[in-house]
Amino acid sequence: MPRMSLYNPDTIAAIATPPGEGGVGIVRISGPNVWEITDALFQPLDKTPVSVREHGTFAYGKVTDREGEEIDTGLALIMRAPKSYTREDVVEIQGHGGAVGMRRILRRCLEAGARMAEPGEFTKRAFLNGRIDLLQAEGIFDLIRARSDRAASAALEQMEGKLSAQFNGIYEAFLEVAANLETTLDFVEDELPDDVFSGIADLLDRTFQSLDKLLDTWDEGRLLREGARVVILGRPNAGKSTLLNALLGFDRAIVSSTAGTTRDTIEEGFVLDGIPLRIIDTAGLRETDCDIEAEGIRRAEAHSEEAHLSVYLIDASQPLHEEDRVRLEKLDPAKSVVLLNKVDLGNQFSSFKFQVSSFVEASLVSGDGVEDLKRAMAEALEKGADLQAPPHAVISERHRHLLIQSHTEAKQARAFLNRNVEENAVLAAEHLRSALEHLGQVTGRQYHEELLDNIFSRFCIGK
């Protein structure tokens, strides 16, 4: 059902393909004047105007400027409402890929009467016209930005409406409880069956289980969407740059026996067990009189404070340095893995005094222990997230925030049902209505302009 309160009837256009060179580039046009605009700029080879062609067909021809001079040749794909992405009349002009050619076609669309689309406006119209809900729209965004196969699979499930179905089930249950409570207000107390309020409470309790199950997916959702920052720490020559290269599988950082070679941070992307990571190699931690090296050490410490996981390297072939001892005692046990490097030269380290997630022995020069380290890193990052289960749609921070608010309101309603329920039925129903309002903002049953702007402004122009 269309949600028309914020609908803008302009015809919009935008380049729908990434910038740069390519075999094909697409300019998308959507809105009520799409046929008039397309006929003004696209001349089919068979002379049959685009405006009279059937849905789902292509026309081959040329794009022309105002004077009729050719800009490009290509295809026009015709999609008639409501069978298009936006549920409006849509034409996609497919020309030769290239920044200049695409800009020329877009400029011609604007001259013919279209307006430049805002970021995410095509998807916003799909929502406002009832084709998708907000959860599905966010699934599209997540799929575009997915950095791992698992993240893409989770986003696809969300696009298909599986997360929406879970939220809608909770919403309908809360709605039923609220309606049943309000119905009791029309009866005299003695006229109500004895089990009416207990039945309402039981339904509410069962719904809490579904709500809690959704909340439990947040840790996994955070990792899949945002990834994790992993910082490599340790004294000079412990093997930090060697570890970065071993994890990436290529020589990204300079490796040297000269202490202090790495003076600034080096960042690279890496996917571990479906988790997108940002691996950060840092300067060796030590006392120094060099201002440049000191700044590198300061940055290393700052990254350590912000990281989801710290991998601390120790040269196990040497007696434990006092600098290492002090820093090991300061590590957050839940967010740290210690790598004992160079064990092929002997292991002089004893771990019993330090509380961290795990210790891994390795010889990074030969590659021994790298796979063990990856497993230890994954286990530390996966705490609170079931990343071994099949990929499934998971909630985002926005969903979590609204779920918590809804949960709080519903708990208040449940508390009223526990004491003098007949007198407190009105108050319980009010809290459930507030819970419904928060849940409604997740899927878009209830929305406002600021909410939509916050969601769709993150999209690229053309989607």
Image: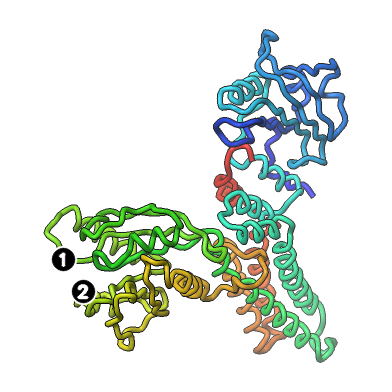
Please, what secondary structure does the residue beneath circle 2 have? Answer: helix
Gap between marks 1 and 2 measured at Cα:
9 Å
Q: Residues within 10 Å of mark 1 (few under 14, many from 20)?
A: few
Give the label on residue 323, or none: 2
Please, what secondary structure does the residue beneath circle 1 have? Answer: loop
- The quarter holding residue 290 reads bottom left
Relative placement, left or right, of 285 versus 430 is: left
* Residue 311, percent from left and from top: 37, 69
Q: Nearer the viewer, residue 419 or 85?
A: 85
Indicate whether 152 appears above or below 120: below
Relative placement, left or right, of 260 versus 170 is: left
Give the label on residue 325, or none: none
* Residue 454, percent from left and from top: 55, 50
Indicate whether 225 appears above or below 58: below
Residue depicted at x 42% and y 71%: 368
Question: Of the residues shown, which amino acid type is indicated by label 2?
Answer: Glu
Q: Nearer the viewer, residue 87 or 77?
A: 77
State the quadrant of the C terminus.
top right
Question: Of the residues shown, which amino acid type is indicated by label 1?
Answer: Glu
Indicate whether 190 appears above or below 358: below
* Residue 124, percent from left and from top: 66, 44
Residue depicted at x 66% and y 13%: 65
- CB-based contact (under 8 Å), mark 1 and mark 2: yes
Residue depicted at x 44% and y 69%: 370
Q: Residues within 10 Å of mark 2 (few under 14, many from 20)?
A: few
Residue under circle 1? 287
Q: Earlier in the sequence, mark 1 or mark 2?
A: 1
Residue depicted at x 69% and y 59%: 158
Q: Nearer the viewer, residue 167 or 178?
A: 167
User: Which residue sits furthest left?
Assistant: 289
- The quarter holding residue 304 reads bottom left
